[in-house]
Image: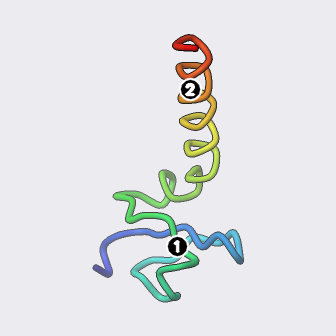
């Protein structure tokens, strides 16, 4: 998987190919840019899910 990118949640660095333990990684992502914005994307998804939960309550 050297052609994939991973975001390391401990170092906040993008890794080309999985180099760290899976418990510290988000991914894989097709591009470096996608991996760079992994936390932002996850945060947005969580906010959307929370909003949906509030609407259903």
C-alpha separation, residue under disc 1 versus residue under disc 2: 22 Å
Asked whether, in this view, residue 32 is left or right of residue 2, the answer is: right
Residue found at the very far right of the displayed protein: 11
Q: Few, some or many C-alpha atoms within 10 Å of disc 2 (few <14, some 14-19, many ≥20)?
A: few
Q: Quadrant of the C terminus?
A: top right
Q: Earlier in the sequence, mark 1 or mark 2?
A: 1
Name the residue located 51 percent from the left edge and 58 percent from the top edge: 35
Q: Quadrant of the N terminus?
A: bottom left
In percent of width and height, residue 43 lies at 64, 41
Tally of marks: 2
Give the numbered dot on residue 25.
1
Give the numbered dot on residue 15.
none
In percent of width and height, residue 38 lies at 56, 53
The residue closer to the viewer here, 54 or 2, is 54
In percent of width and height, residue 42 lies at 57, 45
In percent of width and height, residue 37 lies at 58, 50
- State which mark lies toward you, 1 or 2: 2
Q: Few, some or many C-alpha atoms within 10 Å of disc 1 (few <14, some 14-19, many ≥20)?
A: many
Say which residue label 2 marks. Answer: 48
Residue 12 drawn above or below residue 36? below
Asked whether, in this view, residue 3 is left or right of residue 42, the answer is: left
- Quick one: SS at disc 1? strand
Residue 45 sits in quarter: top right
């Amino acid at each position: 998987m050297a052609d994939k990118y991973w975001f390391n949640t401990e170092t906040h660095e993008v890794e080309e190919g999985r180099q760290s333990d899976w418990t510290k990684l988000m991914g894989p992502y097709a591009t470096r840019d996608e991996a760079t914005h992994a936390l932002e994307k996850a945060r947005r998804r969580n906010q959307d899910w929370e909003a949906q939960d509030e609407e259903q309550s």
